């Protein structure tokens, strides 16, 4: 998985978490921009997942393939799931959901790389 | 935090006034549905991988992973359904979850031999930022709050 893509995905996730977290703190419902940000984050996640799958099919040997695939599935499911729930919840709690999505995705980028390289 | 606000929901509108209850699947409840869903997903994934690929290494830890996964799934569904029955089942599940994280957390600290591999609840959920410890407390508070009648509509 290319380093620039990993860093970009984590940065988008953390920025979204900070933005939505600030909105929740100010008792604001998710704004259009935050919902679009969740879609952008999903596009980054899909791109990262695609590079990982390409590396696996090239014969990259993974110590714990099943765990890696599990993380990968969660990684691409979480933004759309959060998006749908946040749209149903036009209160500050919708903003908290988006903040959680951003934070969890950033953490998952790190975990994915650890499992991918067999560290940790 | 505005804890007294009551969101109108299908439950509160359909029932007669004396049975009027707070909906548990809106507001903070919707956040809980999302976080419980995340844990249902990750605990299920972990349990399936552990049991399918290396069950003999740590049977106790892996059975507990599966139990945790089932509890998270049932709790997620209960939170989302928001009926009287599902709230009761939810309270039961979340209570088991709280006892589980406390017992497994303590035992995994004292007897590391019984837990050579991690579960969601090992070391009080430290591998998940202690969220597994905070989540049942928050969930229980939310569900018990939902069991009380909602205040009068004219606020």
Image (cartoon, rainbow, N blue to C red):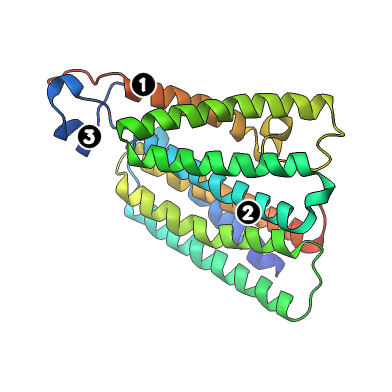
Q: Nearer the viewer, residue B58 or B105?
A: B58
How far, Cα to Cα, is label 2 from label 3?
33 Å
Q: Mark 3 and mark 1 in contact (Cβ < 8 Å)?
A: no
Left or right: residue B144 versus residue A10 is left
Q: CA distance from mark 2 to mark 1?
A: 31 Å
* Image point (36%, 21%), residue name: B145
Residue A89 visible somewhere in the drawing: yes
Q: Quadrant of the N terminus of chain B?
A: top left
Horizontal relation, residue A34 to residue B109: left or right:
left
**Badge 1: chain ID:** B
Q: Is residue A26 in sight in this rendering?
A: no
Mark number displayed over residue B45: 2
The residue depicted at 44 percent of the width and 32 percent of the height is B90
Chain to which mark 3 belongs: B
Q: Which residue: 62% across, 62% down?
A: A72
Q: Secondary structure at mark 2?
A: helix
Q: Which residue is mark 1?
A: B145
Horizontal and vertical percent position of residue A32: 33, 55
Asked whether B129 or A30 is in front, the reply is B129
- Disc 3 marks which residue? B11
Please tell me whether mark 3 sits on a helix, a strand or a loop: helix
Badge 2 density bin: few <14, some 14–19, many ≥20, Cα 10 Å? many
- Report, in whole angstroms, how far the alpha carbon at label 1 lies from the one at label 3: 15 Å
User: In which quarter of the view is residue B83 placed?
Assistant: top left
Instruction: Tell us which disc is closer to us: 1 or 3.
Output: 3
Q: Is residue A6 above or below residue B128?
A: below
Contact between labelled residues 1 and 2, with CB atoms less than 8 Å apart? no
Which quadrant of the figure contains the C terminus of chain B? top left
């Amino acid at each position: 998985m290319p380093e620039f893509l990993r860093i970009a995905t984590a940065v988008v996730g953390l920025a979204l978490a900070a933005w939505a977290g600030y909105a929740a703190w100010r008792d604001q419902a998710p704004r259009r921009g935050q919902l679009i940000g969740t879609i952008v984050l999903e596009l980054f996640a899909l791109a990262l997942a695609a590079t990982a799958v390409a590396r696996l099919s090239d014969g990259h040997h993974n110590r714990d393939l099943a765990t890696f695939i599990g993380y990968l599935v969660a990684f691409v499911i979480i933004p759309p799931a959060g998006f749908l729930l946040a749209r149903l919840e036009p209160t500050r709690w919708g903003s908290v959901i988006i903040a959680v999505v951003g934070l969890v995705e950033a953490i998952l980028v790190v975990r994915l790389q650890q499992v991918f390289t067999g560290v940790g | 935090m505005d804890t007294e606000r009551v969101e109108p929901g299908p439950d509160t509108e359909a029932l007669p006034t004396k049975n009027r209850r707070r909906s548990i699947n809106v507001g903070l409840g919707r956040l809980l549905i999302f976080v419980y869903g995340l844990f249902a997903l990750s605990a299920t994934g972990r349990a399936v991988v552990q049991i399918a690929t290396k069950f003999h290494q740590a049977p106790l830890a892996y059975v507990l992973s599966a139990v945790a996964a089932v509890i998270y799934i049932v709790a997620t569904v209960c939170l989302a359904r928001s009926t009287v029955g599902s709230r009761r089942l939810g309270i039961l599940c979340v209570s088991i979850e709280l006892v589980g994280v406390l017992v497994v957390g303590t035992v995994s600290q004292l007897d590391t031999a019984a837990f050579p591999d991690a579960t969601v609840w090992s070391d009080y959920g430290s591998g998940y930022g202690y969220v597994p410890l905070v989540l049942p407390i928050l969930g229980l508070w939310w569900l018990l709050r939902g069991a009380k009648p909602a205040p009068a509509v004219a606020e």
